[in-house]
Image: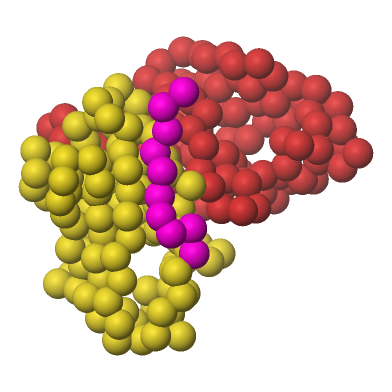
Chain colours: A red, B yellow
Amino acid sequence: KNEVEQSPQNLTAQEGEFITINCSYSVGISALHWLQQHPGGGIVSLFMLSSGKKKHGRLIATINIQEKHSSLHITASHPRDSAVYICAVRSSEGGDSNYQLIWGAGTKLIIKP
Amino acid sequence: EPEVTQTPSHQVTQMGQEVILRCVPISNHLYFYWYRQILGQKVEFLVSFYNNEISEKSEIFDDQFSVERPDGSNFTLKIRSTKLEDSAMYFCASRGYEQFFGPGTRLTVL
């Protein structure tokens, strides 16, 4: 069983639509990351969450620790948002040096003009 | 804005050859990481490094792999004798409060 599950695997939407990508995890965590990977391969960190909600521009990330679930929302989506969005969690086991991330498989998002 | 850099962006090598992938982490960060992503698969943790030594490593990180911080700024990943299955994108990351990722090195083993 995967420790980090994302849904959907693939998502195609029209420009302007509100997008939601979900992440569920089965381990205890101390932090959850949302990352973006463009076709060229580079990874950009979007958010790091340990509770509540964060907003940056048109991106909103929420986390429910009790339900072990996080969502990434994109408002007023645009073709340039097309990318793979990856959820990754930091296990709460181990000390501060243990920051290996457990990665989800990613959600491939395509926004059509 | 500070960033993690990696060189080269693409490395092509013959099976059995040694490769060194280089990373320059963000200057005041203390924790460093290597991850890899085989084409079409998830990103996988390889190794973390702190205080000039390995703090965690995955099963993937066998004796063929080594890491080093040779000069206080660079952070390198060496693969001693490359195999076809080592072909992947290799990402370096460094961490202060948050973890920042480099753009990756695409390694192709022929």
The image quadrant that residue B36 belongs to is bottom left
Q: Check the image and report above or below for B103 versus A48.
A: below
Does the magenta run of residues contain B7?
yes
Does the magenta run of residues contain B89?
no
- Residue at point 25%, 81% (across, down): B81
- Residue at point 53%, 66% (across, down): B39
Residue A76: percent from left, percent from top: 80, 23
Q: Check the image and report above or below for A13 versus B98.
A: below
- Nearer the observer, B11 or A57: B11
Q: From the viewer's perspective, tell me whether residue B27 is left or right of residue A59.
A: left
The image quadrant that residue A59 belongs to is top right
Q: Check the image and report above or below for B53 versus B36.
A: above
- In this view of the protein, can residue A11 be seen by the observer? yes
Q: Check the image and report above or below for B30 versus B106.
A: above
Residue B55: percent from left, percent from top: 12, 45
Residue A95: percent from left, percent from top: 13, 32
- Nearer the observer, A110 or B102: B102
- Nearer the observer, A80 or B104: B104
Magenta region: B1-10
- Residue at point 56%, 53% (across, down): A41
Q: From the viewer's perspective, tell me whether residue A83 is left or right of residue A78.
A: left
